[in-house]
Image (spheres, helix red, strand yellow):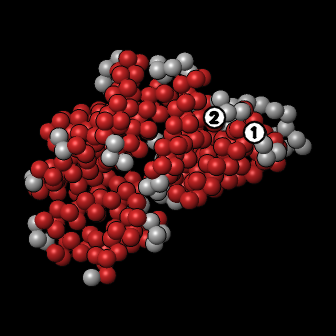
Amino acid sequence: MYSATNTPNSRSRTPRGHEHPGRGHIIISIGAVYAGKGDFENALVQYQKGLEIQTRVFGSDHPDVAASYTCIGVVYYSQGQYERALEYYQKALEINIKVSGQDHPDVAASYNNIGEVYRKQCKYEEALEMHSKSLDIKTRILGGDNHPDVAASYNNVGNIYQKQGKYEEALDMFTKSLDIMTRIYGGDNHPDVASSFNNIGAVYAGKGDLEIALVQYQKALEIRTRVFGSDHPVVASSLNNIGAVYARKGDLENALVQFQKALEIQTRVFGSEHPDVAVSYQNLVGVYQRQGNHVQTKEMVTKAYHIFLKVLGPDHPQTQGLKPFVDE
């Protein structure tokens, strides 16, 4: 989950020249509307216009400029262009440290964003370093374990441990996050609570406790559907997770239903060329392969491979993992 603590106009400094800073803020706000609608191309155009204005008005070392870099990074991250996202998140981090010092929410947010890019790139040691830095700052400046941003960082650190197969450490992080969330929000009707249930499910799935995993994943799906509606990426993510549990239990029909629902949502939301769409194709590969459906298996592998190749490049582990099957 990315973070964008610093937003344009979050702090003021005397502008340079005669161009009014409000124009840049308005353009950035228009970009945010496009981004919220999933229209990332138009969002990017507006964000870049806003960045140019803010750089002229404030100079290059200003919090509003850092916030605009973050907004552009978020667009690239949402499009699966992780190298470009990393470039802009790092620019934002440099400015935030220069302007605010290390112990500031904007710096913690930048570390968080960079950590999420590394996670997507499967660079787990680098991701853990970034998320741990973010957690340390948040714990110091937000008064310990009683803030949703601290809980979010526990979740992010737990995600990395889970990817590394360190299930006990991951479960400890996720449980801490869930405790904070339920204490703050007073129940299980908040998306962050859903994220904690989802992550705890992932740990139990990793340990092979499939029934417990399924219960946790279903709790997450119920909350997410209630909060976001049925046509949302996090709902698709929950469906994929539930499908994976059914597949491991040998219930291939139920697995296929969940994976197909997830793919339909992701294609509507992201379009046809997004890493998450490719992951759903991969999930279908596993089911079709076990059903002996060789035609569908080959089709799904090929679709997933070409998305990974285009978006993540030939050297990414997910691209490399599928290449031998495409070359057959």
Q: Residue at x 52, y 32 (%)?
A: 135
Q: Is residue 237 above or below residue 106?
A: below
Residue 221 falls in image quadrant: top left
Can you say which quadrant of the picture contains the C terminus? bottom left
| Secondary structure of the residue carrying numbered label 2 | helix
Q: Which residue is mark 2?
A: 106
Amino acid type indicated by mark 2: Asp
Cβ–Cβ below 8 Å for labels 2 and 1? no
Q: Position of residue 126 (x, y in %)?
A: 52, 49
Q: Residue at x 20, y 63 (%)?
A: 286
- Decide: few, some or many residues near mark 1? Use Cα within 10 Å; few <14, some 14-19, many ≥20: some
Furthest-bottom residue in this view: 328
Give left or right: position of 90 versus 318. Answer: right
Residue 162 falls in image quadrant: top left
Q: Real-space Cα distance between discs 2 and 1?
A: 11 Å
Give left or right: position of 118 versus 45. Answer: left
Counting residues from the start of the chain, the first of labels 2 and 1 encountered is: 1
Amino acid type indicated by mark 1: Lys
Furthest-right residue in this view: 17
Q: Is residue 133 above or below residue 119?
A: above
Q: Residue at x 26, y 50 (%)?
A: 240
Q: Position of residue 89 (x, y in %)?
A: 61, 48
Q: Which residue is mark 1?
A: 98
- Decide: few, some or many residues near mark 2? Use Cα within 10 Å; few <14, some 14-19, many ≥20: many
Of 32 and 97, which appears nearest the observer?
A: 97
Of 267 and 134, which appears nearest the observer?
A: 134
Q: Residue at x 18, y 76 (%)?
A: 295
Q: Is residue 213 above or below residue 141?
A: below
Q: Position of residue 138 (x, y in %)?
A: 55, 28
| Secondary structure of the residue carrying numbered label 1 | helix
